[in-house]
């Protein structure tokens, strides 16, 4: 791991009862996130439906029991109790290939559900890393704003001394006091932003109570690899896997609807006992059923299934084009964020040196307030931009991982 935010490791600024690490957050989200739990159940449902589609390949057995009695005013037609017990079996021999097509369709639908689950995992992974990084950023921002406010306070005290000594005018004093009040406001603003960031992470963790915790970690990313073959990455992404599975389901759907134009052939058998003497009976045979006229419904259903198949193919092609674009965009954004973080680090270092020199010059009366104020503002701006750049770098890495279909969620 390459620590882009070297020197920015710190503990949480507020003493709360709980401090989460990144590993803690991943485990808790994997166990408690409701969207992830729903996607897992949807995948299980699709798998059970796929297993159920094997049913037509097996013999269908049924047990029938009957007890009847009848009576009336005419005793000559009075019938005594009658009872029967029988076992029947039916085995499909040919169903117009519908059984095989139904099996392939549910198999494809199960694959689509697993791809949808992977998509939820990659989205949650991105959201979790973004939210976790936002808290790191908010904690660092709160610490920075408190440091800035203290620096502004000291600067205002220095300007006040020079003003009292007649070496600074009132405008400089008022300007210094105003920047101090703005710094104090930014401290309060940063505290509110941290509270909101905690609540956002709590949502992804599946927590419903107050979000009273800090996080520990740093702004670190793995060194990005050289530009990959973006087209080769497409097949492993959930944005491709799901429409690809939907296409296979649509192909099976065409065969399934075409099967209704063919006859059904099945072998049947029956063995039963009847009456008070339990006389046994049996029968066996073959049944053929051929649809002759359904009002055109079967033909139109076939045409509709073919249209759905063409739609699924176009959807997959469109998805692949979008995936390729997103891969290139997120990779370029990651490279830009990495370069920006490095530049911002250098700007902070240079601004700190300039601020130290400017402080000494102004204290000794060798620098005007206006020039000194510009140097101070440059330092503050550089420090704020630096931590934003570090946050944006981690988020850019998370977006690149999501585009590839990678997830930290098991």
Image (spheres, rainbow, N blue to C red):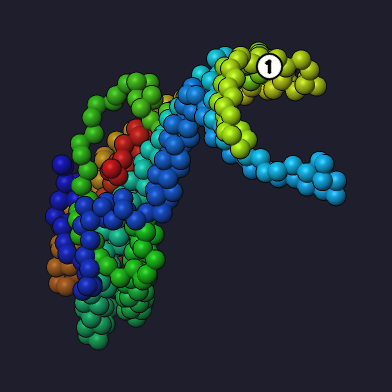
**Horizontal arrangement in the rendering, residue 305 relative to residue 109 (left or right):** right
Q: Residues within 10 Å of mark 1 (few under 14, many from 20)?
A: few
Would you identify the image quadrant in which residue 358 lies? bottom left
Point 25% across, 77% down: residue: 153
Quadrant in which residue 151 is drawn:
bottom left
Please state the horizontal and vertical placement of residue 316, each as a whole percent of the image.
51, 24
Q: Nearer the viewer, residue 377 or 29?
A: 29
Can residue 302 be seen here? The reply is: yes
Between 160 and 306, the one nearer to me in the picture: 306
Q: Position of residue 148 (x, y in %)?
A: 25, 69
| Residue visible at 20% across and 39% down in the picture | 222
Q: Please name the residue shown 36% across and 63% down the image.
A: 207
Residue 5 position (above or below residue 59): below
Q: Position of residue 162 (x, y in %)?
A: 22, 80
Q: Is residue 240 left or right of residue 346?
A: right
Q: Secondary structure at mark 1?
A: strand
Q: Position of residue 17 (x, y in %)?
A: 22, 72
Quickly name the residue at label 1.
289
Q: Quadrant of the N terminus?
A: top left
Q: Quadrant of the C terminus?
A: top left
Q: Is residue 183 visible?
A: no
Q: Residue furthest right?
A: 74
């Amino acid at each position: 791991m390459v620590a882009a935010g070297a020197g920015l490791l710190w503990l949480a600024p507020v003493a709360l009862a709980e401090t989460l690490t990144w590993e803690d957050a991943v485990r808790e989200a994997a166990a408690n996130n409701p969207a992830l739990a729903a996607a897992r159940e949807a995948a299980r449902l699709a798998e059970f439906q796929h297993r159920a589609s094997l049913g037509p390949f097996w013999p269908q057995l049924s047990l029938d029991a009957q007890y009847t009695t009848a009576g009336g005013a005419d005793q000559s037609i009075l019938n005594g109790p009658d009872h029967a017990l029988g076992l029947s079996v039916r085995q499909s021999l040919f169903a117009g290939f519908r059984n095989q097509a139904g099996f392939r369709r549910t198999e494809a639908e199960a694959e689509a559900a697993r791809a949808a689950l992977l998509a939820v995992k990659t989205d949650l992974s991105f959201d979790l890393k973004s939210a976790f990084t936002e808290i790191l950023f908010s904690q660092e921002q709160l610490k920075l704003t408190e440091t800035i406010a203290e620096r502004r306070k000291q600067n205002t005290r220095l300007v006040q001394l020079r003003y009292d000594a007649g070496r600074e005018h009132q405008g400089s004093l008022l300007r210094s006091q105003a920047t101090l009040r703005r710094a104090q406001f930014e401290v309060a603003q940063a505290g509110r932003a941290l509270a909101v960031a905690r609540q956002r992470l709590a949502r992804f963790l599946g927590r419903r109570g107050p979000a009273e915790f800090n996080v520990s970690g740093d702004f670190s990313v793995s060194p990005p690899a050289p530009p990959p073959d973006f087209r080769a990455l497409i097949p492993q992404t959930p944005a491709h896997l799901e429409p690809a599975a939907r296409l296979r389901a649509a192909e099976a759907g065409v065969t399934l609807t075409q099967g209704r134009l063919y006859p059904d052939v099945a072998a049947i058998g029956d063995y039963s006992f009847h009456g008070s003497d339990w006389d046994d009976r049996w029968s066996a045979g073959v049944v053929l059923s051929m649809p002759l006229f359904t009002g055109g419904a079967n033909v139109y259903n076939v045409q509709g299934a073919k249209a759905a198949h063409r739609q699924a193919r176009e959807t997959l092609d469109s998805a692949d084009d979008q995936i390729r674009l997103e891969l290139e965009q997120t990779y370029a954004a990651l490279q830009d964020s990495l370069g920006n973080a490095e530049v911002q680090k250098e700007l902070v270092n240079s601004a700190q040196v300039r601020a130290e020199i400017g402080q000494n010059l102004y204290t000794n009366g060798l620098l005007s307030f206006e020039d000194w104020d510009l140097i101070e503002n440059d330092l503050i701006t550089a420090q704020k931009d630096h931590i934003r750049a570090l946050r944006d770098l981690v988020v850019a890495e998370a977006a690149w991982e999501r585009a590839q279909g990678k997830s930290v969620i098991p």
